[in-house]
Image: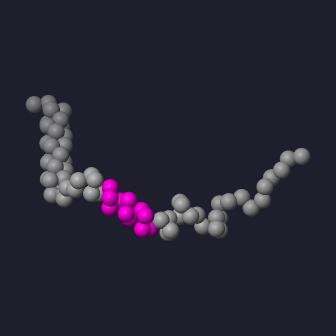
Amino acid sequence: MPAYTNAREAEALRRAKMELQSLQTQSCMKRQKTSETLKDLVSYCNNNLKNDRLVYPDKVNPFKTKKMCTIF
């Protein structure tokens, strides 16, 4: 048997093992309805809105330009 056939078989076996492991992991996950998950997500966002730096950025921004450059 040529060496490349053994390498292909070994690669196919490795991929099959990885897929099996992934499927086993996914089968153990707790499933929830999307409607329930979205309600929880919206509630979390509303509860943490005041601490969100994207909505209320810091007053001191180290990356903000200090002065404007004007060309006359």
Determine the residue positioned at 32% across, 61% down: 40
Q: Does 59 sit left or right of 47 as displayed?
A: right
Q: Majority secondary structure of the magenta segment?
A: helix
Is any part of residue 39 visible from this angle?
yes
Of 41 and 20, the residue lying toward us = 41
Of 33 and 27, the residue lying toward us = 33
Residue 12 lies within the magenta run = no
Determine the residue positioned at 47% across, 65% down: 49
Is any part of residue 21 visible from this angle?
no
The answer to which image quadrant residue 30 occupies is bottom left
Determine the residue positioned at 18% across, 46% down: 19
Coloring basis for residues: one colour
Of 61 and 4, the residue lying toward us = 61
Instruction: Please report the bounds of the magenta region as a residue range.
Output: 38-48
Determine the residue positioned at 18% across, 33% down: 4
Q: Does 18 sit left or right of 64 as displayed?
A: left
Of 31 and 9, the residue lying toward us = 31
Picture coordinates of residue 72, whole percent (x, y): 89, 46
Q: Does 59 sit left or right of 23 as displayed?
A: right
Q: Does 59 sit left or right of 69 as displayed?
A: left
